[in-house]
Amino acid sequence: MLELEFMRLAFASGAIVGVLAPAVGFFLVQRQLSLVGDGIGHVAFAGVAAGYLLGLPPVLTALIASIGGAGAIEWLRARRHTAGDQALALVFYTGIAAGVVLISMAGALNVNLFSFLFGSILTTTRSDLALVAALGIAGLGTITLLYRALSAVALDEEGARVAGVPVAFLNVVLAVLAATTVAISMRIVGILLIAALMVLPVIAATRVARSMRSTFLLGIAIGLASVLGGLTAAYYADLPPGGTIVLIAAATFLATSAISMLRRG
Amino acid sequence: MPVAVELRDVSFGYDRGHPVLEHVSLSVEAGEFVAIAGPNGGGKTTLMRLALGLERPTSGEIVLFGEQATRFSGRSSLGYLAQRSQLGVDAPATVREVVAAGRLASGGLLGPLRRRDRAIVADAIERVGLAESADVPLRRLSGGQQQRAFIAKALAAQPALLVLDEPTTGVDVEAQEAIAALLDRLHRELAVTVLYVSHEFGAVERFVERLVLVRGRIVFDGLPANLPSVWHDPSHLHA
């Protein structure tokens, strides 16, 4: 399998996304914002459509749209103009509607579009891998530096604000991290499934881990194993990689839930 | 005694024409243990948020340790326990991880916690009596123990002012009494100014030096013993 270059590229880019997605998702889950990735994904769809319409690289326009969408969700939530779920719904549906209109205008309702919606990791190029690696390493480096700060805000946002911690800045950093993750993961698992890779490994880890740090690390391990296992299964069983990856992550949740129940007797 | 918090003729409303607080003046000296009580919707949490500089008054002035509250430069020395509903009590965090979060403002945002900060965290955990549960996940503890962990988080800031918003809500009467006794001990040991904001003040009534009742304005400010009997909290037998 690894003698094929397209599989090596798929494994390399998949490994980066498999680590980054749950690392970012960890903070979203702790803040009960598990669906934010889904909301950003729908805005990313509008970004891809805009890329086709304007003749620009869809990953670039999706990245710009994702950051805008993530910023809008955070702004609406932080200013309390709307409740968190309403802010998400507003951005979610505006994004998908804009995507449908733009894609129709671009006349791009074709296989290429489907590769963004459902993932097309087996068509990853060297330049795709370079982009995923650059943004992925930047994202993971940011999380390593700010892990303690992002965790503290997740535990007690108001307390952090009282103590003078720059909560708004940290929230923007998290929103940009989520947007970047969505944009670079589109080709791996697809816009419709990326949020699952951000959230399911973390939820699975939460069932058996005994601390924030162990949940964070186990979530990353499950995310990485889901991607590598999913790609392998997809190659040998001729299955769609994105869906297979997410189904493995979901199966891991069932397994960790069973372990948790057995522990409690 | 220097003044820790001072509100000078403060009025505030979230919507124009609907004031929550009107013409409130209050001065809390450094080292005092004060309970701020009143009915839900009476404005006590708003008063606390104004005192911490989280809201700007519609009129009047608020001073925190000699500085305008909204521009207070010593925020890392404020210890704050938010209402239980705002805390991540369901997070998979251990007690130590929760308390370490209280060192964020003082210990710096980047990288791991330094040795000195870790020692301060361990001391705060010890002070609230959770040393043996330091590495136990928070969600395995009782409501009262979880509140102790978050009090330790506030202590980890080595605060000059400790503000607790409804610290006994959602815990049983026995745990409420234990939390009140803990706060009394911490107040005496650390000489920290304590603002205890709650609609239930029965648990702390015998410990506080001063009780302030808020109902849109201050309707009582004095020794708990001087409180008219009809206003006492019936949920605590000693009241």
Image: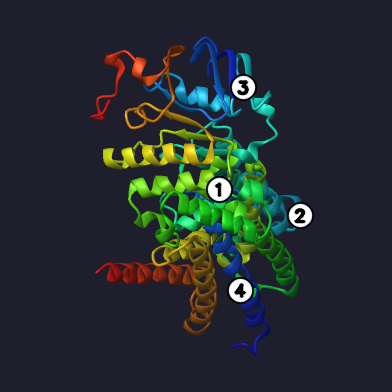
- Residue at 48% across, 65% down: A201
For the residues bearing labels 3 and 2, Cβ distance under 8 angstroms = no
Q: In this orientation, which residue lies closer to the viewer: A237 or B145?
A: B145
Between disc 1 and disc 4, the foreground one is 1
Q: Is residue A3 above or below residue A48?
A: below
For the residues bearing labels 1 and 2, Cβ distance under 8 angstroms = no
What residue does disc 1 label?
Answer: B156
Dot 3 falls on which chain? Answer: B
What residue does disc 4 label?
Answer: A15
For the residues bearing labels 2 and 4, Cβ distance under 8 angstroms = no
Q: On the rendered structure, is B36 left or right of B178? A: right
What residue does disc 2 label?
Answer: A55
Check disc 2: other Cα within 10 Å, few if <14, some if 14-19, many if 20+: few
At label 2, which amino acid type do we have? Answer: Gly
Residue A155 is labelled as none
- Residue at 63% across, 70% down: A16
